[in-house]
Each structure stands twice: as structure tokens, then as C-alpha cells.
Amino acid sequence: MLVVSEIDLYYGASQALRKVDVVAEKGKVTCILGRNGVGKSSLARAITGRHPIRGGTIMWEDKGISSMGPADRARAGIAYVPQGREVFSQLTVQENLYTGYAPLKRSQRNINPEIFDLFPVLKSMLKRRGGDLSGGQQQQLAIARALITRPRLLVLDEPTEGIQPSIIKDIQNVISILRQQGDMAIVLVEQYFDFARALADNYAVMDRGEVILSGRGDEMVEEDVRRHMTV
Ligand SMILES: Nc1ncnc2c1ncn2[C@@H]1O[C@H](COP(=O)(O)OP(=O)(O)OP(=O)(O)O)[C@@H](O)[C@H]1O
């Protein structure tokens, strides 16, 4: 279980997170919602170790991880699919997937065939350069690369951003399958309400660096949430 308690995060003098609490359990999807610039990506960066926190604690599987760097968190089973995907455009799909080996022991460095069951399109594109893939295919590659690290916590930052509806549906199916398998906690940062509602077991809505609304996904009131998502 991931337990984020009262974290503060700053960029210089500017505070981006204020006493944020979030919990993510295995076999469940926790959705982080809110409009642009409210701190969702900052929370994802804090969890994955991309940006230090200045106050509060982050516990993962009962250990404090706040002072661990991103590589150690990856070794602790935390994977990150960043906003904008960050696929290596000059590397092939296969080489991009191999970058997911970094936190693994040598004996674990192989691609589980399930990855290609989840993303069949990638199998036929292994020799293509990352930069030649469509936005949706790059998003699938970024998720596959994260899954190669065999995560127990998967943090996805706006996986639907700029993606065509048919691929959004595919990504939704993949996240449902991962949830059903039950051994992974999933934190999903999302701006697309219907996608979030379809997947959320729990949700938290952010505004100006704070969590202002949270609860169970099946109790999410569309009007209340949407009020904090439109400008
Ligand atoms: N590297 C940075 N340096 C300074 N300020 C930053 C930096 N990254 C984000 N911010 C600021 O921190 C605040 C929170 O940004 P963050 O990216 O976490 O929001 P967000 O909810 O993820 O928005 P978006 O959906 O646009 O990514 C914003 O005011 C943003 O301008």
C-alpha cells in the first residue's frame, strides 16, 4: 500500500502541494483529478521520486521512501508513465522496452509475453523508431516500458492526453486488466472525467495544491467533480 501523508512540495519559493494525503491499495485504481496546474503531476513526481518533498511522508509497503531517489524507488517496485510519454524517439520500440530493464536483476531481464498480449501493436513494431509511432502507440509503449519493470505500484500521468478515442479504450482495458490481476496499486492522474469514472476505485480531486474532495469511485458525484475540472 502507498500512503502519502500531508506532503508539501515546492518549486523554489512557490508551493505546488499543500498537506496532500493520498492512499493507493493493491488491486485498486486511485484517480487524481483536477484542472491544469493544480498539482497533479507534482504529486506523481513526489511519489516516484522525481521531485523532493519538503514536508510530510511517503510510505510504500510499510517503508518510508521520501528520501529515496527515483532509481531506488523503481527497484522498490514503483513505475512511472510520465505526462508526455518521454519515449526515446531515436531508439527502436524494442530498445525503448529494454530501457525498462534498468531496475531489474539480470535474471529478471526479459519481456513477459503478457506485455504483447496487452499491447499487440507493439509486437509488430519492434524495429520501428519510437519517434515514428503515433501518439497513442507511444503511450502504449510508455506503459509497456513501465510494466517491464514488474511494478507493484504504477503511476500514470494523463495517459489519455492527445490520444484518439479507440486507443483510449484500449488503454482503459489494459488498466482494468492490471487492476483485476490484483497485485498492483495504480495511481492514475487524469483530466478526462469519463475515463476516470470508468476506472476509479477511489478518487481525489485537487485544487491549488490541495486535495479538496475525495472518496470512493462509485460514490463520485459527477457535478461536484466536474465543477473542479472546468476552468
Ligand atoms: N518545474 C517547475 N518549476 C516551477 N513551477 C512548476 C514546475 N512544474 C510545475 N510548476 C508549477 O506548479 C504548479 C502545479 O503544476 P503541476 O504540473 O503539478 O500541475 P498539474 O495539475 O499536473 O497540471 P497539468 O495537467 O497542466 O500538468 C503549477 O502552478 C505549475 O506552474
Image: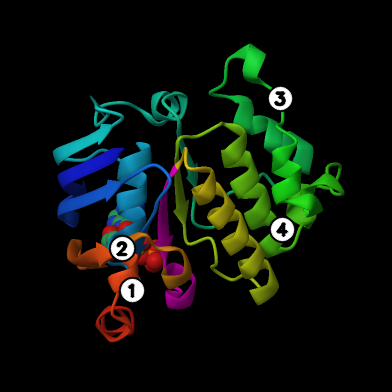
Position above or below: 106 against 158: above
- The magenta span reads 185-196
Which element carries disc 2, helix, strand or loop? Answer: strand
Distance from the alpha carbon under mark 1 to that under mark 3: 38 Å
Position above or below: 217 against 147: below
- In reply to whether residue 57 is colored magenta, the answer given is no
Would you say the beta carbon of the disc 1 residue lies within 8 angstroms of ligand 1? yes
Q: Nearer the viewer, residue 202 or 164?
A: 202
Q: Residue at x 77, y 37 (%)?
A: 94
Which element carries disc 4, helix, strand or loop? Answer: helix
Q: Residue at x 18, y 51 (%)?
A: 21
Q: State which tag comes first along the sequence, 1 or 2.
A: 1
Q: Which residue is mark 3?
A: 110
Q: Which residue is mark 4?
A: 137
For residue 203, the mark is 2
Type of amino acid at the residue the image marks with label 2:
Tyr
For residue 27, the mark is none
Would you say the beta carbon of the disc 4 residue lies within 8 angstroms of ligand 1? no
Indicate left or right for 224 with 25 as reference. Answer: left
Q: Which residue is mark 1?
A: 35
Q: Is mark 4 in CB contact (under 8 Å) with mark 2?
A: no
Viewer-side label of 1, 2: 2
Give x and y (percent) for residue 214.
22, 65
- Circle 2 Cα neighbour tier, 10 Å, few/some/many (<14 / 14–19 / ≥20): many
Distance from the alpha carbon under mark 4 to that under mark 2: 27 Å
Describe the colour scheme in one phrase: rainbow
- Circle 3 Cα neighbour tier, 10 Å, few/some/many (<14 / 14–19 / ≥20): some
